Image (cartoon, rainbow, N blue to C red):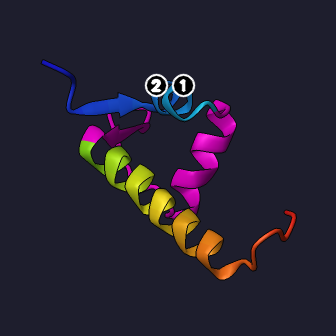
């Protein structure tokens, strides 16, 4: 059984980003998370991370559709 919540280090590893970037996603509200424990450690629910990934796929599809063929980044 996989864990319900992930630490930011796990989120960062899953997304291939730094922990700092994961923290920024959480603090901006782009990636919903909760703070738990006496030191307020951030936790991201596994299902919420998957929803975030799917949302980013959808955003990317829309961006690609809106770009004329052959247009560079």
Dot 1 lies on which element? helix
Q: Which residues are magenta?
A: 17-46
Dot 2 lies on which element? helix
x, y percentage for residue 22?
58, 42
Q: Quadrant of the N terminus?
A: top left
> In the picture shown, does residue 69 fall above or below 27?
below
x, y percentage for residue 54?
39, 55
Which residue is at a point 82% across and 68% down the rendered structure image? 70
Residues packed near mark 2 inside 10 Å, few (<14), some (14 to 19) or many (20 plus): some
The dot on residue 10 is 2
The reply, left or right, for residue 36 in relation to residue 71 is left
* Front in this rendered view, residue 36 or 52: 52
| Residue at the far right in the pictured view | 72
Q: State if disc 2 and disc 1 touch (CB < 8 Å).
A: yes
Which residue is at a point 28% across and 42% down the rendered structure image? 45
Q: Quadrant of the C terminus?
A: bottom right
The residue that mark 1 highlights is 13
Residues packed near mark 1 inside 10 Å, few (<14), some (14 to 19) or many (20 plus): few
Q: CA distance from mark 1 to mark 2?
A: 5 Å
The reply, left or right, for residue 23 in relation to residue 6 is right
* Front in this rendered view, residue 14 or 44: 14
> In the picture shown, does residue 44 fall above or below 65?
above
Is residue 36 in the magenta section? Answer: yes
x, y percentage for residue 46?
28, 38
């Amino acid at each position: 059984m996989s864990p319900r919540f992930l630490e930011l280090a796990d989120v960062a590893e899953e997304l291939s980003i730094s922990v700092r970037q994961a923290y920024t996603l959480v603090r901006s509200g782009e990636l919903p998370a909760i703070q738990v424990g006496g030191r307020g450690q951030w936790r991201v629910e596994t299902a919420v991370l998957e929803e975030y990934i799917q949302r980013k796929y959808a955003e990317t599809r829309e961006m690609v559709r809106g770009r004329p063929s052959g247009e560079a980044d």
